[in-house]
Image: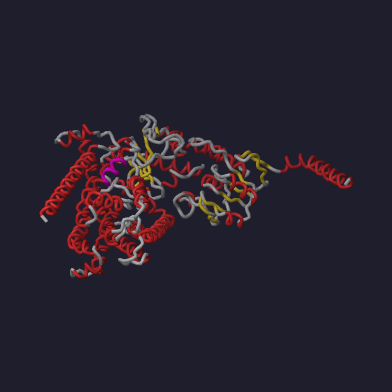
């Protein structure tokens, strides 16, 4: 009995000693970031990255890292179309969709860093964090500027904190440039609309895209139709289409065929009657980019499309 | 003898009165459908339009938005009500409903499949939906062993529920397969009258006229069939042919309705249920009562769907399901399942 206790005591004290000795070493060797699930220790130079969020994929590519695995864009079979332009020879393997991550596919990639979406559930986090350090940004509802913190966190986890600041500045500069170009004009109003066969949905003015448009001097609004914290309104009655009158209307579908959405909308007599349609100020846009993506590459792509639309 | 004739005449007069009352209600519902909506054009502005004046916006909302959906509601309600009554009569089952028997789901699945394969023409859709409705109907009746005697109502509904579940999940699968068609296909899971145009209605008119002609031809033999297979044969009718014709009519009607408004649940159950309560079990009378009752229910439900969540709208299929489900439960819970 006595001997057992003695043995246990020795083990404890030696463990304690080892821990105390290791402490300064760990702090020096490993990087760590603050995530929604607390501090996460990270490998020095992540080599095998898996991104489970469109914004994380965007950030990784922006700082020059091609992930091994990624999830599909919403409403698509692969990565978003604007992402394609930034992919070289190597392409990330698809490991499911945001809401249904294929855990076995993630495991098979043997990741050393997982960049996960803000809304990741705790159960999923537990499983993923056993495969590799998993970085989950804090989510605080809808906020047009939240993506900056997200993308910074992902970039820091990748060890490219400096690069991301430069990119964010580039985004700001581009937005300011667009705002300047059309200085003199009254700041034009705009709505972002998703067209459905039964009627349109208005996208919230608190989304990623809305923040960019506002920074570019476009007064984006949601016609007071979306409720707090919801990304878009319910399907609006065609009788109330006139509420969407604005200087500009950006029309998207769930998927990339904005032009087809415009065709569909033109079939509706209520849409053709709109002043914004008569003035031909309805711009078909890529829904994958405008209503689903986030990150610095997406921001620059949206600003390019916006610039092209606003420039006569 | 004299007394019987007199009481027969009295009951006929009563039925005519009831029918006239329903027609009046339907006219009122149509007017309400023109006057009420999710937008700012209220009854006062709408009345001005009906009186031949009114502002441009009110005229547009009435003429281009509310009038088409009212007309489509009329036709869809008519089709679904009559289809439900026929299906219940031929299966001798008060639970037979196009929505429950996989007919609507078959039509919706066929349309979704056609969309996936690249179809866009409105006319093609109607034929495809009708074919799907027919296949769905035959599948269920085949599974439930379609025979006059010893036909268990609940078995039929179970077979229908299984097929509906299968077809709905297949439709969802298509939705996953091709996200490009997703917005279009989503419409085929819950029906709605919003955003439908008069061209959609024009496309289904020929098949509705054909179905109407067939209904007139088949009503009398179907009533004879209700007296029993032998009686019908003795009167010179051919039961097998009658059943086949009825299924064709049901497929034509439900396919046309689904192609126009998507699957709208429970109308085919509730309408014949109410019609029988008002007119008694004779299919020839029940059908007359289905004519105003079907549109009345669809149009009323559509008005509710516009007003409930204004300025948005709720899909019509949701409203009819909410109202129809209690009726289904009531029929099932009735101590003695009424056999037709």
Q: Is residue A113 visible?
A: yes
Q: Quadrant of the N terminus of chain B?
A: bottom left
Q: Nearer the viewer, residue B241 or B223?
A: B223
Magenta stretch, main secondary structure, is helix
- Magenta span includes A149: no
Q: Is residue B177 above or below residue B67?
A: below
Outermost residue, left side: B2
| Magenta segment boundaries in residue numbering | B297-305
Q: Quadrant of the C terminus of chain B?
A: bottom left
Q: How many badges with numbers are in the image?
A: 0
Please give left or right for residue B17 compared with residue A303 in the image: left
Q: Nearer the viewer, residue B148 or A54?
A: B148
Outermost residue, right side: A3
Please give left or right for residue A35 compared with residue B107 in the image: right
Q: Nearer the viewer, residue A237 or B327?
A: B327
Indicate the quadrant where residue B135 lies: bottom left
- The image shows residue A137 at horizontal and vertical percentages of 57, 40
- The image shows residue A49 at horizontal and vertical percentages of 60, 50
Q: Residue at x 34, y 48 (%)?
A: B327
Q: Is residue B184 visible?
A: no
- The image shows residue A133 at horizontal and vertical percentages of 64, 47
- The image shows residue A126 at horizontal and vertical percentages of 62, 47
């Amino acid at each position: 009995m006595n001997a057992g206790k003695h043995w246990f005591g020795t083990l404890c004290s030696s463990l304690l000693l080892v821990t105390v000795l290791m402490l300064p070493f760990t702090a020096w060797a490993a990087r760590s970031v603050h995530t929604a699930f607390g501090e996460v220790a990270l490998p020095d130079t992540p080599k095998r990255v898996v991104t489970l969020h469109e914004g994380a994929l965007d950030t990784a590519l922006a700082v020059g890292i091609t992930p091994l695995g990624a999830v599909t864009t919403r409403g698509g079979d692969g990565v978003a179309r604007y992402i394609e332009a930034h992919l070289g020879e190597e392409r990330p393997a698809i490991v499911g969709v945001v809401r249904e991550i294929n855990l076995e596919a993630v495991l098979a990639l043997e990741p050393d860093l997982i960049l996960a979406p803000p809304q990741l559930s705790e159960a999923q986090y537990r499983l993923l964090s056993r495969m590799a350090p998993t970085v989950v940004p804090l989510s605080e509802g809808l906020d047009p500027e939240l993506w900056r913190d997200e993308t910074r966190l992902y970039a820091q986890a990748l060890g490219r904190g400096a690069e991301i600041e430069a990119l964010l500045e580039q985004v700001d500069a581009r937005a300011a440039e667009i705002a300047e170009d059309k200085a003199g004009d009254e700041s034009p109003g705009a709505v972002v609309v998703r067209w459905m066969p039964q009627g349109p949905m208005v996208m919230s003015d608190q989304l990623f895209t809305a923040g960019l448009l506002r920074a570019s001097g476009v007064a984006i609004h949601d016609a007071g139709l979306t409720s707090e914290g919801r990304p878009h309104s319910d399907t609006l009655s065609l009788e109330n289409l006139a509420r969407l009158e604005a200087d500009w209307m950006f029309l998207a579908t769930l998927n990339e065929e904005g032009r087809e959405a415009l065709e569909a909308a033109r079939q509706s007599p209520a849409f053709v009657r709109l002043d914004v349609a008569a003035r031909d100020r309805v711009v078909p846009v890529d829904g994958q980019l405008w209503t689903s993506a986030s990150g610095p590459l997406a921001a620059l792509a949206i600003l390019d499309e916006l610039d092209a639309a606003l420039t006569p | 003898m004299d007394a019987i004739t007199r009481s027969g005449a009295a009951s006929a007069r009563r039925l005519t009165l009831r029918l006239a009352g329903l027609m009046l209600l339907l006219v009122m519902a149509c007017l309400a459908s023109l006057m009420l909506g999710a937008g700012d054009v209220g009854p006062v502005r709408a009345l001005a339009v009906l009186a031949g004046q009114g502002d441009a916006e009110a005229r547009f909302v009435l003429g281009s938005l509310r009038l088409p959906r009212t007309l489509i509601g009329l036709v869809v309600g008519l089709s679904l009500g009559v289809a439900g009554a026929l299906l219940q009569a031929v299966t001798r089952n008060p639970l037979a409903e196009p929505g429950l028997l996989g007919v609507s789901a078959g039509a919706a699945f066929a349309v979704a499949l056609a969309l996936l394969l690249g179809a866009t023409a409105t006319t093609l859709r109607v034929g495809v939906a009708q074919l799907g409705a027919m296949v769905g109907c035959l599948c269920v009746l085949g599974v439930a062993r379609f025979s006059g005697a010893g036909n268990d109502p609940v078995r039929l509904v179970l077979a229908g529920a299984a097929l509906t579940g299968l077809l709905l999940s297949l439709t969802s699968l298509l939705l996953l397969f091709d996200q490009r068609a997703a917005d279009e296909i989503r419409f085929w899971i819950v029906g709605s009258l919003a955003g439908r145009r008069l061209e959609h209605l024009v496309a289904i008119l020929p098949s509705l006229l054909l179905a109407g002609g067939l209904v007139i031809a088949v009503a009398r033999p179907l009533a004879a069939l209700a007296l029993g297979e032998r009686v019908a044969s003795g009167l010179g009718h051919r039961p097998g042919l009658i059943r086949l014709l009825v299924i064709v009519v049901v497929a034509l009607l439900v396919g046309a309705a689904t192609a126009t408004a998507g699957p709208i649940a429970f109308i085919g159950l509730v309408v014949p249920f109410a019609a029988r309560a008002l007119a008694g079990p004779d299919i020839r009378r029940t059908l007359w009562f289905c004519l105003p009752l079907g549109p009345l229910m669809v149009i009323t439900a559509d008005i509710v769907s516009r007003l409930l969540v204004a300025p948005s709208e709720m899909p019509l299929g949701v409203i009819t399901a909410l109202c129809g489900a209690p009726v289904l439960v009531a029929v099932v819970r009735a101590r003695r399942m009424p056999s037709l």
